[in-house]
Image: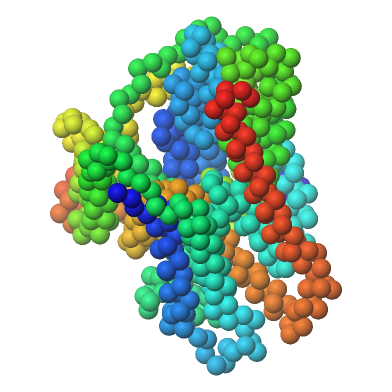
Amino acid sequence: MIESLLAGVDLALRVDTFIWISGGLLLGMLMGALPGFTTSMGMSVLVPISFLVGDPLIGIPFLIGVYKGGIYGGSVPAILISMPGTGASIATVFDGHALTKKGKSRKALEMSLFASAISDFLSDIFTLVMIIPVAAIVLGFGPPEIAAVMFLSLVIIAVTATGPVIKGLIMLCLGVWVGFVGADPFSAMARYSFGTSELYDGFHLIPILIGLFALPEIFNAVKEGDMPGSSVASFVGERLRLDELKNSLRTIFRSTLIGTGIGVIPGLGQPIAAMMGYIAAKNSSKHPETYGKGELDGVAGAEAANNAVNGPTLVPLLTLGIPGDAVTALLLGAFMMQGLRPGPTLLTSSGDIVFGILIAMVLANVLFVAIGYVTIPFFARVVTIKKSLLIPVTIMLAFAGTYLARGNPFDIVTLIGFGLIGIAARQAKFDVAPMVMGFILGRELEYTFGQTLALAGDNWIRFALTERIGMTAVVLATPVIGLLLGRRMAYFRKRALERENGDVL
Amino acid sequence: MSHLEADVKFTAVVLVLAVLALVFGGWLIAEPPIPLGPDILAMSPKVFPTLILAGTALVASIFLITKCRNGTLFVAGSVGEGERVGGTMYRQILFVFITVTCALLLTTLGFLTTMFLLMASTSLLVGNRGVFQIIAISLILPLSFYVIVTHVLRTALPEIDFIERALVPILRLLPSV
């Protein structure tokens, strides 16, 4: 694996990789800075573009650039117009917008940039260091262990989805069911294909992702109509001083630790990390009363925590093939389109490429600071762009991207079908992320479970109790863990909401 | 005037589909031929779908029963809601109709014509009233995208012969990549 790491260094240091990462960062910042444009929507329409460039060392880093840029970009409207560009920037609003009201928006935006870049860099290093031992452990996993881990992940994803746990479970089951359409992995017999060859091949991931994430956003924009661009966005005040950044370093490091820990666990994601980072910064402050009234540390705490999630989400994705959230599900789709199958054997089969991508991701943070610093004034103006100019472009990219992924007209029908499901789910306040996870992991779970049964032979009860007792323990513990986690999350969300409404954090 | 909550309608549809799929599982899932019987296959193709569908039906039923017990199956409509909803509902239905139509016509009308129709109508529905702006966006962007994809990335997008032939002289003027 060390040889792969060294080979990855060679592969990562390419000019074209850095050009595409820069493009990804710019596009991500643009998407994040536009209120109403989510990172997952932007990435979903850009996944097929990453495939068209043909080289995983260009396409995947490009998408990682979009991811990083998007999470940071969300802080721009949060600070300037009190409207988080992405869910990850909810906590940035509290102090970021207060700073804008005081005429210090430039300081807030620069603090957001530096906190994001520092935490992103540190958490990427953690990812690079952690992935080797985790991959070594996972390499020893057989079908029973993988099936158990997948089951555990599915339950965690369902209970940590937005909204009540039961809604997450319904969407998860729906996703797993959709994954069964097509040939059975063992006998190749048709399931739910109605005699058509298109359905026999099963649904392709890309139209599902674009349909579930992009079309409901466009539909929502149509529903709301065009809102006049904000005229209050302003980029004013003094620059951030070095001593101010130094004073916030402790907060940035603390939030980096929080974000990194959350990133490794599938299903939690940036909004929770940002909220926890912000609360931790406030609780450990000597002057907590200044929080919510324009405290630079508040911006640093929230932004460092949400960006620190980005890298570590790749640990379960690359080693186990488990996407932690919607964005990593899109990255999984991008990996699969490039012929790379995330899972226990990825690092042994394509280690050099994976390490190349990870090293490019670490180095991208330098570009992140440079591009972010130069373009802050531009993105401060972006928040004023009307939706009516951007929504048509998004719908064109959604259609074209879906078609270009495989050149199959049936994918366009799939796009519309899942778009309608996404729209209905959004109207009914169901989170679509568990459905995507269910679709991706359900078939894998079935396959590994079938392999486990085959290994067990006739005497599978004895097999489970004696040889795979660890797996049985995990499987039995999962519902309990899931329920506890669900209650905990509900409590946390309720508390966060109460605090937000009461303006007392 | 009260009506069913959106999440109740969504869950009810999921429940009905799950029950139908369970009932008609025998028709919807092909049986493996006899040589691939239980002695060879570790698991029948029906096992996992049946488990998941039963789980779906159970969870959806629990959700609906809970809503029913809490008395939150219905939501009360407010005075004047009809007029407010009417405008947005009209735009939403039109958007769905246009999107579905364009999806079905993509291969027949070609990428550029379909995208012009889709982008122009979406612009109008989102609220853009600048005719020149709409035409410019709906013409120039798909054309630029088409040129990049076909000329630079060497990938095909569906297009009718007439337009493809018309674009050849323009593409020839571009430097080869």
Between B91 and B77, which is closer to the camera in this rendering? B77
Q: Is residue A99 left or right of residue A83?
A: right
Is B6 placed above or below A128 here? below
Q: Is residue B70 visible?
A: yes
Residue A437 on image: x %, y %: 55, 56
**Colour scheme shown:** rainbow
Residue A422 on image: x %, y %: 41, 52
Is A124 placed above or below B155 here? above
Q: Residue at x 59, y 89 (%)?
A: B37
Q: Is residue A407 visible?
A: no
Q: Residue at x 19, y 56 (%)?
A: B109
Quadrant of the image occupied by residue A120: top right
Quadrant of the image occupied by residue A268: top right
Q: Residue at x 55, y 49 (%)?
A: A164
Between B98 and A91, which is closer to the camera in this rendering? A91
**Residue closest to the far right:** A466
Residue B120 on image: x %, y %: 21, 41
Q: Name the quadrant of the C terminus of chain B.
A: top left
Is A142 placed above or below A402 here? below
Between A48 and A456, which is closer to the camera in this rendering? A456
Residue A199 on image: x %, y %: 40, 70
Q: Residue at x 24, y 43 (%)?
A: B82
